[in-house]
Every structure is written in C-alpha cells, then in structure tokens.
Image (cartoon, grey):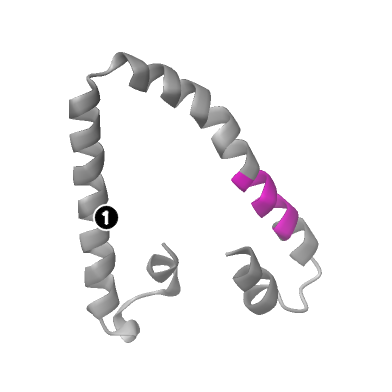
Amino acid sequence: MLLWATTDVLRDKPYAPSVTAALMVAVSIVPIVVTPVAGTLVDRWDKRQTMLRSELFRAVLTGLVTLLAFLPSRYLSPLPLLL
C-alpha cells in the first residue's frame, strides 16, 4: 500500500513525505496498542469458540472479497478494491 500511495496517488504532491510518514506510524502503532489488550482478552476466552468465530469471520471476509472481484469495476470506487 505504501508503494502504491507514493508512486501513483501522491506523485508530485508536496505533502507526500508527510502522508508516507503517517502511514508508517499507523502501521507501527496499531500492533503495539492492540496486541496487549487482545492477548489479555483472548487468554480468558474459550479457545474452541474463539477459533471457530475467527474462522467464520475470515470465511465471510473471503467471500466478500471474492464477490468484489467479480463485480465490474465501473460500479465500485477504488476504496473497496484496496481492502
């Protein structure tokens, strides 16, 4: 995503370095903040139920991405395609 943003979207823009730095900070901060909280909660939950729910969530997301891939691009904005 960083390569795409810097080479295509932000080409010849004066604020490109700031956006690049903000993107790198966002990518670094999220795991540092979320990991301890998520680890604490997940350790207390039922392991089997947690695993089944995560697999169901992943299956739903995979199905949605598959549906997006088959839609004509003229019906979608670029944002859903990035996800």
60 on left or right of 40: left
**On the picture, is 11 further left or further right than 72?**
right
Q: Residue at x 71, y 58 (%)?
A: 19
Residue 26 counted in the magenta span: yes
Position in image of residue 25 (x %, y %): 68, 45
Question: Which image quadrant is residue 12 in?
Answer: bottom right
Residue 29 in the image: x percent, y percent?
Answer: 62, 37
Above or below: residue 59 compared with residue 4:
above
Q: Where does the image place residue 15, in percent across and percent down from the top left?
A: 77, 64
Q: Quadrant of the N terminus?
A: bottom right
Quarter placement of the C terminus = bottom left
Total count of labels: 1
Which residue is at the far front? 48
Question: Which amino acid does the dot numbered 1 rest on?
Answer: Leu
Tell me which residue sits at (71%, 59%) in the image: 20
Residue 72 colored in magenta in the image: no
Residue 81 coordinates in the image, percent (x, y): 40, 70
**Residue interval drawn in magenta:** 20-27
The quadrant where residue 73 appears:
bottom left
The residue pinned by badge 1 equals 61
Looking at the picture, tell me which residue is in the foreground, 40 or 78.
Answer: 40
Q: Residue at x 24, y 29 (%)?
A: 50
* Relative to 41, residue 50 above or below: below
